[in-house]
Amino acid sequence: MSTENTEPRNDGPNKLLSENSTSEPTANIYDDVTSQNTASSQDHPVYMEGPTTSGTGGNEPPHTGQPWGNGPSDGAPSHGQPGDISYFGRWQDVLKLCCWNTLWTILTLGIFRFWAKTRMRRYIWSNIVIDGDALEYTGRGLELFLGFVIVTLIFVPVILALNLIGSMLPAHLMMLPMIFTYIAVAFLFFVATYRATRYRYSRTFWRGIRARLSGSAFKYALIGFGTSIVTLLSLGLLAPLGFIATTRYQTDNTWIGDTQARFNGTFGAAFKRWLKSWAILVLVVGSVIALSAVASGPSMIWLPIAAGVIAYFGVAFVFLNYNVWLFRYQADCTEMGAIRFSSNLQTSQYIKIILRFLGLSLLLLIVAGLLMLVFGGFAAFSAFNPGNAGNPQQIAAVFIPIVIAMLLIGPLLSIVGFTFMIHSMLAADISSLAYQGEITDLHANAEAQNIPRTGEGLAEAFDLGGI
């Protein structure tokens, strides 16, 4: 089998997915995207829109500066005058691309999702601009598909063999294969995470320089799995240990050309911040348990329910606030040669994004519910109307829209979730980043590297290959 060329191609700035830029390809939906994007263009309405200097219309600001940025904040780390890291992706484009990807994925019974991921990555990468130049993603949907096929051919027989062995064991030993499977899945989760990251890095270029991830996925999995056990045994108290250990290993094995990244974060700093959050979590959960124990009688049943609701949102806020701090801390402790990074991401940004997503999802459910209620009324009228007795066509004509609406709720919620939450959070993360230092020491690595030839097959089992 011939290997595919993943070097950046000079196809011109921001070409569309095909020569016919006005319609989706229909001749062969499995043909991979062949165009790449590096700069702005006049005619790229959906897939490969890069930074431009003109306004975008609607409520979007002009493509100048950082359209998703926040500006400085008091709590943001500062290293002097940071460089420019911008994201120019627009939710309108992402929404259109999500709709097309979802449609083709449904029509192909899920097979097109590998090509859908590739299209989305190419759009997002091409709109990440560092020092005036956009990233370039050269991965192919066929690579992801082949990786998935290979992993399926390997693991399906293993799972079947474990089930067969379990059925042959005595009753008191039948749980052993299941326990072994759970442990193996937990370990392979970290292997899949690292291998998926390695693949994405190997297909990422900036100014013609390839990113890469060295190190061992097996060693990363040992670190992640081991620290997860420690976290579990400590009831979550030592959770920062896993983050610091895995982040340091991955960052220290990250390369841009021949320049290696470094992570200088410490467990002590992360633990000090986490200890406050952990204490709040313990206090909140303990209060809910205590209120549930003392509440008695019908008149007091509302007390534990109200406390549980408050605790749920309180715990969610604590976790969200801590994770935002972790992102800023990770950026502040990351170096790439003489370049240092920082972030001014704020929890309030995430809260606004989540509230917007919840509002849109609720609106979608209300509209879908009203439509089903209307069609349901017609269906009931048709079913009990004596004139329609023995006329299944009229009844089916009313019931079919209800079934279609129910089947479409899931995909529509998925589209809304990716467009207005996942993509928006990603945009906020990227636009919050800045760097200090001159990007002059990055050079392409001329040494032959072990570039993965297939995609994130193992990651597909854990749904890790979204972006």
Image (tube, rainbow, N blue to C red):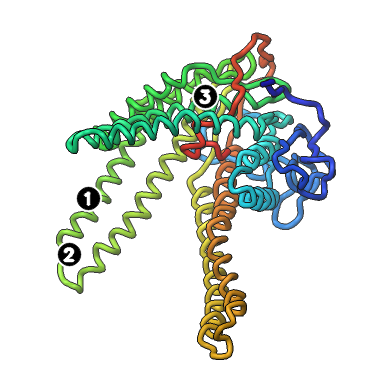
Q: Earlier in the sequence, mark 1 or mark 2?
A: 1
Residue 159 place in picture, x, y as percent: 39, 34
* Quadrant of image for the C terminus: top right
Q: Considering the numbered disc 2 on the image, is that residue within a helix, a strand or a loop?
A: loop
Q: Residue beneath label 1, please?
A: 286
Residue 437 place in picture, x, y as percent: 63, 21
Spatial separation of the CA atoms under disc 2 and disc 3: 50 Å
Q: Which mark is residue 334?
A: 3
In contact (CB < 8 Å): disc 1 and disc 3: no
Q: Which amino acid does the dot numbered 1 rest on?
A: Gly
Q: Residue beneath label 2, please?
A: 295
Question: Is residue 92 rendered to the left or right of residue 179?
Answer: right
Q: What crowding class fits label 2: few (fewer than 14 Cα within 10 Å), some (14-19), or many (20 or more)?
A: some
Question: Is residue 142 rendered to the left or right of residue 38?
Answer: left
Spatial separation of the CA atoms under disc 1 and disc 3: 37 Å
In the rendered image of this protein, does residue 174 appear above or below residue 204?
A: below
Residue 291 place in picture, x, y as percent: 20, 59
